[in-house]
Image: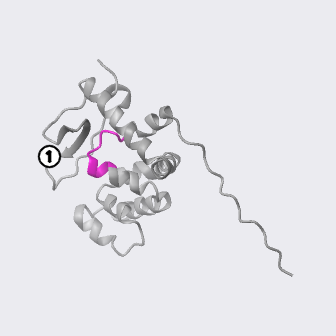
Amino acid sequence: LLVALPPAQAQERPAYSQAELDQMLAPIALYPDSLLSQVLMAATYPLEVVEAARWSRAHPGLQGDEAVRAAQDKDWDPSVKSLCTLPDVLKKMSENLDWTQDLGDAFLGQKKEVLDAVQRMRANAKEAGHLESTNQQTVTVENEIIVIESSDPEVIYVPTYSPVVVYTSP
């Protein structure tokens, strides 16, 4: 005798607040758009990020396109594979797995709010004088959207900064 059981209810997490999104996005909001999008997408695959970080540590001699080609046989999302060129970014995401999971959940469940938070934080950094074009990146404003691009499309620039400093006025 088979008894039909109701499907398990997935426990949904309440939406992240603006303050939670700001705290979560502060370390990456000033990344160039192409890198930011890859990090946000990869965060939706946290276990693959961990696998890729381990793989990257096991293959320290592989860099750039060579690393991506070597990872092509892996069953990972393309966003995760693309981060194999940036082992430090993978390491950060892997070592802060709760943050990565939250980032992925926020991106999947609150994409508009995530993107709005990034723009709000970029505007704060720009207003505080901490977000400008440099030799490594070009910052432009298009229809009130702040766009950050690597100055050299062949080079992925990963800025390092203190969120406490860049989002506040001197």
Q: Main secondary structure of the magenta part?
A: loop
| View extreme (right): residue | 1
Q: Which residue is mark 1?
A: 151
Residue 47 at x, y percent in the picture: 50, 60
- Relative to 76, is 145 above or below? above
Residue at horizontal 35%, vertical 50%?
89
Q: Quadrant of the N terminus?
A: bottom right
> Visible in this render: residue 27?
no
Q: In this view of the protein, which residue sits in the foreground, 168 or 49? A: 168
Q: Amino acid at mark 1?
A: Ser
Residue 126 at x, y percent in the picture: 25, 28
**Within 10 angstroms of label 1, few (less than 14), some, or many (20 or more) residues?**
some
Residue 32 at x, y percent in the picture: 26, 45
- Magenta run includes residue 50: no
> Visible in this render: residue 153?
yes
Protein image colouring: one colour
SS class, disc 1: loop
Magenta region, residue range: 27-36
Is residue 71 shown left or right of residue 95? Answer: left
- Relative to 70, is 101 above or below? above
Q: In this view of the protein, which residue sits in the foreground, 55 or 23? A: 23
